Image: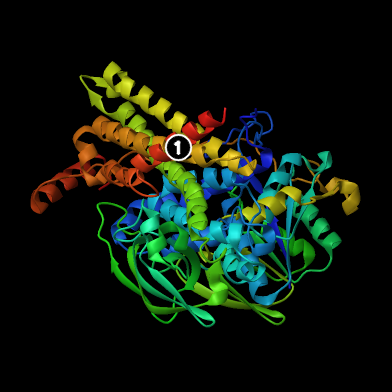
Amino acid sequence: MNIIVSIKQVPDTTEVRIDPETGTLVREGVPSIINPFDENAIEAALQLVEKHGGKVTVLTMGPPQAEQALREAIAMGADEGILVCDRAFAGSDTLATSYTLARAVRKIGDFDLILCGKQAFDGDTAQVGPGLAEHLGLPQVTYAIGLEVEGKKLQAKRLLEDRYEMVEARLPALVTVVKQINEPRHAGLRGVMKARKAEIVKWTAADLEADVTRCGLNGSPTNVLRVFAPSRHTKGERIEGEASEAAVELYEKLRTAQVL
Amino acid sequence: MEFAFTEEQQDIFAAVDEICAEVLAPRAEEVDKAQEWPQENVDLMAQSDLMGLPVPEEYGGMGLGFLDWGVIGEKLSGACTTTGAIFGAHMLAIYPLMLFGTEEQKQKYLTPLARGEQVGAFGLTEPNAGSDAGNVQTRAVRKGDEYLLNGSKIFITNAGPAETYIIIANLNPDTGMRGLTAFIVEKGFEGFEFGKNEKKMAYKSLPNRELIFNDCRVPAENVLHRERGGFRVAMQTLDVGRIGMAIGAVGLAQVAFDKAVAYSQTRVQFKRPICEFQMVQKMIADMAVDIAAGRWLTYNAAWRKDQGLDFEQEAAMAKLYTSEMVGRVTDHAVQIHGGYGYCEEYGVERLFREAKLFEIVEGTSEIQRLVIANKVLKNARKK
């Protein structure tokens, strides 16, 4: 089976810098990694291909340095990497990104399954995977914690807030995975050497025959007005002592605070 | 003279650093406490293609150099000393097969070792023969198409889990080293059994077992090199083994140093971090110099090996220096940690105990000095 894993290169830090003008991420000078959830998607793809045969293609949209993320995926065991890169894609929101990736998937053509991480570490929207499925008209399964493929059918176990859900879908389909689905492997030396020599395929907007009005800032209806850190909750107060006394003290405090 | 690694080497080392930091180092204490063979770590080394680094690709290896092997071994030893020791002892089976194995022997024995499907071990030491290799009493007698081995080996690292053993036996103990012959012995050969696992002061999860040969039947095609060629096999294996011990010592010293430096910056006495006191700084400076000196001696020996130059003296020098260096460095590391250094929780007392191993195995410091002096005097006579 042929699997496409759609990945994103993200800054390796929780201290993401934001451009105050555009409200978008500033990536220069910040070390980059594969989005951790996408590493789970790569691992899931490698395990399926080890079991059923086939090939893993890693796809990403990003600046030229995103090539490094593709090489890291190849070092883990992916067969090839495709970088979708063009000035026209700059400033894409999740709609424009999923449109662009959908064009790339159509250009790849032959595939049985698309895997994504449940969301990116930086933007945290969890929209690109589902958006990609919609653009391609594919069944989508989100938050998979387990995944099996049999013939032209997949079975997935979804991790929901209060329960698991078992679902089936026909292939081709798109699945997003959660961290708990597996433990991503570390690249071995053979992989590192293969990744160094690998040819990364690079596609521009023209190669994708993309409608540029649907790409980049032009194709992004989302306007980021402001990005800010949420205010931290203040620390709670602990009332020590005998239960009966503590209850009285609590009652007094709540009354003073006009909660009661 | 070039003191930098290539980009490819840097990429490879970065991959090993990641494995060390994320997997091996966090479970190093647990591995030592378990007193069990850390199969998980051996599997990880195999999956990461680390078990046959200098073995040609046609025999399942990576086709890298001994310097690459050395740098990687140093990292593994720093992250988990036990895993580093397994990695080092494994080479003692790989290297003689690389040097002396026939095509068939390389296909059958070297390839699974290089791929990490099997672990190797090397057996020379006996109750009355270690440094004195000529006194090996394990007897080999030819009987038709096979040899019968009788005797025992002690302290054999990796023994038990290992599948392939390079065993030095004697065809004629009366002729001393001239009778020595190397055999490839498989675990499971009739008449080959394991004796007790030694209880040591450190490296408690690393097996060092007795090997017992009781009319052990070894096919004639399993002679490595040739009959009576065993002394050469043993000596050449030990040359690389000494580099292996040196990288282990450097890795161990480095981790002790890193712990000591970090501790000295956080431990406050007299209202100042103790690293601000000159007597602590002296220890830090001495450790830094000591480790760097040992590392470069070791890299030089490995580099000479890769260049096809004579490296016997350099390997002995690296082993001698680093094995004593690691004792000094771990001593300082415990001292900087004070009372906590003497307690298990901080891990430096374990490193302190482990350090002593290096002065004893793979030729004691006394033997290294003999090797070095012999080389120096021989070269001086030539002039």
Q: Quadrant of the N terminus of chain B?
A: top right
Above or below: residue B68 compared with residue B121: above
Q: Nearer the viewer, residue A136 or B37?
A: B37
Query: At 53% from the left edge and 64% from the top edge, which residue is drawn?
Result: A182
Crowd tier of the residue under label 1, counting other residues whose Cα lies within 10 Å: few below 14, some 14–19, many 20 or above: few
Q: Which quadrant holds residue A113?
A: bottom right
A157 left or right of A9 in image:
left
Label 1 lies in what chain? Answer: B
- Residue A56's x, y, as percent? 72, 64
Figure colour scheme: rainbow
Q: Horizontal placement of B212 versus A38: left or right?
A: left
Q: Position of residue B250 (x, y in %)?
A: 43, 39
At horizontal 64% and vertical 55% (from top left) the residue drawn is B62
Tell whether A80 sits left or right of A144: right
- Badge 1 amino acid: Asn
- Up/down of B198 relative to B349, above or below: below
Taking the spot 36% from the left edge, 24% from the top edge, the residue there is B286
Is residue B200 in view from this perspective?
yes
Label 1: which residue?
B374
Quarter of image, res B333: top left
Is residue A157 among the parts visible in the rendering?
no
* Percent position of residue B229, x then y: 53, 60
User: Toward the viewer: B211 or A127?
Assistant: B211
In which quadrant of the rendered image does the C terminus of chain B lie?
top right
Residue B163 locus on image (x, y percent)? 47, 71
Element type at mark 1: helix
Nearer to us in this view, A10 or B192: B192
Q: Residue furthest top?
A: B278
Q: Residue furthest front?
A: B174
Q: What residue is shown at x 64% (from left), y 69% (from top)? A: B107
Given residues A24 and B286, the one toward you in this image is B286
Say how many tags the image has: 1
